Amino acid sequence: MIKLLGISTAIIFVLNAVSIGGHHQASWEIYAQSNSTVETKKQPLVANNSQGQQATVIVTKVVRCDSSLGIPSDDSVCQFVLENVDANQFDLVVTGNNPNVTSFQGSANGTNISLDPGNYTISETPFDTMDIENQLGETAIVTILTDSSDDCSSQFNQVDTFQETKGTISNSELQSCEIINTVDVSQGSSPEAP
């Protein structure tokens, strides 16, 4: 009986070996494919775990004014400028690890940017000063000076012009980055002057 059982096992093994070499080989390939599909489905779950550790940068835009030789006074020129140049007139671009927003308008109240840990940069589109120059008179010279503070640091080119601000953020960290634009006016004449 044991010999008979051993022989039948050997015959079944031989039959299975034959079927593996023939028709059933495709089903082994399918098994391997379905197994790799299961493994592929598991990979995004690992990536999603890091998303739960995203960080936040609050980007605030500040607009200031500095006037020299203003008519009737520097204060009146700056008052006019600050009534006509708003934080939302500045367009900002953020790059980093998977930010939820890549471009946005500046806000004095701040804009929350969620991103993965690592390095990030924030740059801005240059502000067109032509309109405000025209309103302040033909002798007015208007330039925008940009800087940043808090958890980000300004980067300037060789001629000391602002390029971008940079920062590094960790898992679940909350940072703030203030970008300051000073409207510098020389020889402006306030249109609201008597």
Image (tube, rainbow, N blue to C red):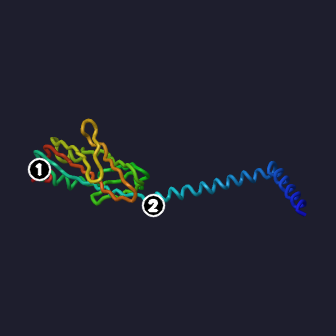
Q: x, y percentage for residue 92? A: 33, 50
**Element at label 2:** loop
Q: Residue at x 54, y 59 (%)?
A: 45
Task: Please indicate whether residue 143 sits to the left or right of residue 105 in the image.
Answer: left
Which residue reaches farthest bottom?
Answer: 1
Front-lying residue, 14 or 120: 14
User: Considering depth in this image, is 166 or 19 the residue closer to the camera?
Assistant: 19
Residue 52 numbered mark, or none: 2
The residue that label 1 is drawn on is: 74
Q: Estimate the x, y position of residue 111 in percent, counting from the top left.
A: 33, 58
Mark 2–mark 1 distance (CA, rounded to whole Å): 50 Å
Q: Is residue 44 placed above or below 155 in the rendered structure?
A: below
SS at badge 1: helix
Three-letter residue code for mark 1 = Asp
Decide if residue 98 is on the left or right side of residue 153: right
Q: Position of residue 185 (x, y in %)?
A: 17, 45
